[in-house]
Image (cartoon, helix red, strand yellow):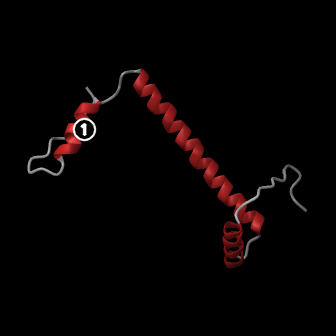
């Protein structure tokens, strides 16, 4: 019986993905539900981190803490030359 504070989610996934989940579940001797829960938890953690980093970057932009695009482009273009430019820095 599942824990009391759970909710069943249903999703249609491609058969090949479902088969991979089953293979991993068999290999790890875990249930399909355990595998899906682990994958979903990892994906949500990744998305929350991406959101945090985006908010942090937007705050930097709002504060004017940016590097000029042209400076970055000039630096990138110089990387395959005999005298690459130093990496641009915040001013």
Q: Residue at x 84, y 50 (%)?
A: 7
Q: Nearer the viewer, residue 76 or 60?
A: 76
Q: Quadrant of residue 89?
A: top left
Position of residue 73 measured from the top left corner of the image (x, y, whole percent): 24, 38
| Left or right of residue 65: residue 45 | right
| Left or right of residue 78: residue 73 | right
| Left or right of residue 9: residue 55 | left
Q: Nearer the viewer, residue 4 or 71?
A: 71
Q: Residue at x 81, y 53 (%)?
A: 9
| Left or right of residue 24: residue 79 | left
Q: Nearer the viewer, residue 5 or 53?
A: 53
Q: Residue at x 74, y 64 (%)?
A: 34
Q: In the rendered image, which quarter contains the N terminus?
A: bottom right
Count every numbered label the image shows and give the total.
1
Position of 3 relative to 51 (above/below): below
Q: Residue at x 8, y 51 (%)?
A: 82
Position of 89 relative to 45 (above/below): above
Position of residue 48 measured from the top left corner of the image (x, y, whole percent): 59, 42
Position of residue 74 measured from the top left corner of the image (x, y, whole percent): 20, 38
Which residue is the extreme one toward the top?
63
Q: Nearer the viewer, residue 36 or 81?
A: 81
Name the secondary structure under disc 1. helix
Residue that badge 1 annotates? 73
């Amino acid at each position: 019986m599942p824990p009391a504070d759970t909710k069943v989610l249903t999703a249609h996934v491609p058969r090949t993905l479902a088969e991979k989940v089953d293979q991993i579940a068999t290999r790890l001797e875990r249930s399909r539900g355990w595998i899906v829960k682990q994958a979903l938890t990892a994906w949500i953690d990744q998305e929350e981190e991406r959101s945090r980093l985006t908010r942090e970057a937007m705050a930097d932009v709002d504060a004017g803490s940016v590097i000029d695009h042209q400076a970055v482009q000039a630096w990138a273009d110089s990387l395959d030359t005999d005298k690459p430019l130093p990496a641009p820095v915040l001013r």
